[in-house]
Amino acid sequence: MKPFWCVLRIIVALFILYAGIQHFIKPDFFNAFVPDFLIYKTAIIYVSGIIEVVLAILLIIPKYARIAATGIFFLMLLFLPIHIWDVFSETPAIGSHKAAMIRLPLQFVLIGLAYKLKKK
């Protein structure tokens, strides 16, 4: 893997790791992102945090980087509808419409990066 992609892989891993850790530090923040029709919202927040932390750690390990990138790709696809909904919501879960409008393109960037990393 070229140095550029190695550095990018580490940056993505750190970003995902930070996000995963936040699920445990500020679980109430993520509560608004979990749709009301789902039960066990707190468990969903913690499990998604665990998944993000594990995938981030695996992404740092070259031997497991492809499988981790694939996992991140599908996880970001799974989260995509939440961020689309947030853009059109009267009260965005992320806090403001401006933040939601910034977060949505970032989601596409993460999906694209994960896709590229799984191919490397």
Image (cartoon, helix red, strand yellow):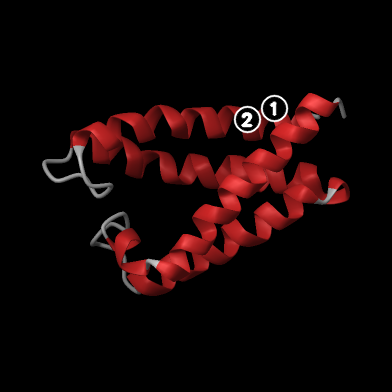
Residue at image point 28% right, 36% down? 100
Task: Report whether 113 appears left or right of 100.
Answer: right
* Label 1 crowd (10 A; few <14 / some 14-19 / many >=20): some
Instruction: Say if mark 2 contacts mark 1, CB within 8 Å.
Output: yes
Residue at image point 25% right, 62% down? 37
Question: Which of the 4 image quarters holds residue 26?
Answer: bottom left
As helix, strand or loop, the secondary structure at mark 1 comes to helix
Q: Is residue 68 above or below residue 41?
A: above
The numbered disc on residue 116 is: 1
Q: Nearer the viewer, residue 109 or 21?
A: 21
Q: Nearer the viewer, residue 5 or 71?
A: 5
Residue 41 rendering spot, x and y as whole percentages: 34, 69
As helix, strand or loop, the secondary structure at mark 2 comes to helix
Q: Is residue 116 above or below residue 41?
A: above
Q: Nearer the viewer, residue 18 or 106?
A: 18
Residue 88 rendering spot, x and y as whole percentages: 19, 34
Please state which amino acid type lies under the numbered disc 1.
Lys
Residue at image point 54% right, 47% down? 75
Q: Is residue 4 above or below residue 94?
A: above
Residue at image point 20% right, 35% down? 97
Task: Report whether 6 appears left or right of 79.
Answer: right
* Label 2 crowd (10 A; few <14 / some 14-19 / many >=20): some
Identify residue for label 2: 113
Please state which amino acid type lies under the numbered disc 2.
Leu
Residue 90 rendering spot, x and y as whole percentages: 11, 41
